[in-house]
Image (cartoon, helix red, strand yellow):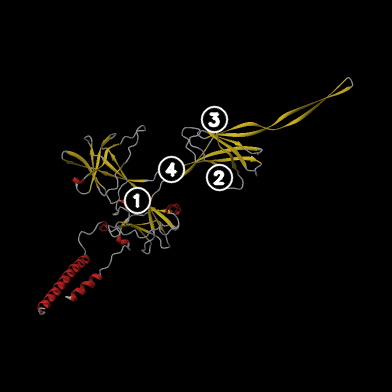
Amino acid sequence: MCSLFRFLLLAALAIPVQAMDSIDDFAFKAALTESQQSLQRVVIPLDLMLKLTSRDLDDIAVFNSAGNHVPFAIIRTPEKISQHELELPFHEFSRFQKQRSKTVTTREQNQQQGQLSEMQTTETVAVQKLRKDFLIELAPDENTPEFDYLELDWKHQPAEQILEVKVEVGMEIDQLRTLKTRKSLTNLGSKDITWRSIRGIPRQQKYLRLTPANSVTEFELKQVFGIYQMIEPPPRLIHTLATEQIKIDNTVYYTFELPSAIRPESIRIIPGEARSVITGNVYSSSNNFDTRQLIIRGFRQHNIDDVEVRPSQPLSIGYGNNNQFQIRSAKALSAAPRVELIYAQHEIIFLGDDKSPFTIVWGNHESRAGNADLSGILELDIKDAREQSELVSMTVAMEAGGIKRLAPESDLPWQKWLLWAFLILAAILTGRMALKLYREMNQQESASPEA
């Protein structure tokens, strides 16, 4: 019996521990286009996401040509921020600046009938100097965006002297308020944008006036650009499903099921009839309809596409574990609605090495691939790393370990059967040894003389 026990123990210890260190441990693979950049990234397409088995996108990995993991991180594709400029109109105003007064003497001589006469006149006059200031239109039309700052192009004399201007803003020309009493500007010897720009302009102002505040002899504004940013929302991936009609207790429901472990951020319910509106409730459940829960009460969706009509907004479905959903319409429908599942787009950023090309792999129900965290070894913030990475693309997807990797095996493999057999036999042997020891102790007690 002891020999059999030792044999089973050695057999159990010989069972190899499965490690996620091979491309074939995943269901699918795809080669990536090559790049010379050390930091590279690839967008995760919707087809790939729908084959993942982990809600946290853990069953994705990147391998080099030597078959080794490379460090990677998965992030949501962020919003896109782009900077734009718009040339603004401006108007020139001339004004006379009074200087210190001075005395002027005029002499006039007349000669009449052989006599010479002279008349001298003395008067005090104020000296005036021509100066220019400029009025900039911050909102030349109703579609003008709000600006982060103004960038100026001008000339002034003497050029080596710093130009100081008074900055005023307002909605009416004759009701301007001072924003800066003296703003220093220079267009010589500096690439710093702050030396040729004006920032901190209040929102929703119509005019901005620049008036020289120091003793430059000339100030001529050439161009004015309003600098602003446009923010595009993060891209979204859309998967469309048909709904199935079921009838329970004389109530009609339209059901659908999530196609993968990755949960969509929101859903859009599209009426089956053209130019229609649908209202009702949305329920969710796991595998039993009777366990359904009301998650959206009184939703309203439509498929009307007109300029005057507000777009139909997606519905948030929350973060529960339920994967089956039921739609109950407030009114009878002649056609089943469709459903759009809306997912956030994700990207993989990975650290390349000299063993290219690289292969992306995905799909394993054991979900133990997230063992190469890029963000933990980078000095850069992961967002900065994304900006410095080069975008590569996937080639045609192929099977690696096959679709059997997407779900646990229905039949236990022989190694697991052997392990279970060893555990059961070990329990039996331990029980028999305990029973034998107990009987021997009882026999010794009965054989001993009474005290």
Which quadrant of the figure contains the C terminus? bottom left
Mark nearest the camera among 3 and 1 is 3
What residue is drawn where x is 52% and y is 33%?
Answer: 170
Helix, strand or loop status at disc 4: strand
Q: Which residue is mark 1?
A: 45
Return the disc, 2 or 3, that comes first in the chain's sequence.
Answer: 3
Secondary structure of the residue carrying numbered label 2: helix
Q: CA distance from mark 4 to mark 2?
A: 23 Å
Within 10 Å of the Cα at label 1, are there few (<14), some (14-19), or many (20+) other Cα atoms?
few
Location of mark 2 (residue): 194
Q: Position of residue 107 (x, y in %)?
A: 81, 27
Distance from disc 4 to disc 3, alpha carbons, whole Å, reads 33 Å
Residue 333 bears which disc, if any? none
Is 401 above or below relative to 218? below
What is the distance, in whole Å, between disc 1 and disc 4 at their CAs? Answer: 23 Å
Query: Residue at 28% across / 42% down in the picture?
Result: 339
Amino acid type, callout 4: Ile
Picture coordinates of residue 412, whole percent (x, y): 20, 62
Element type at marker 1? Answer: loop
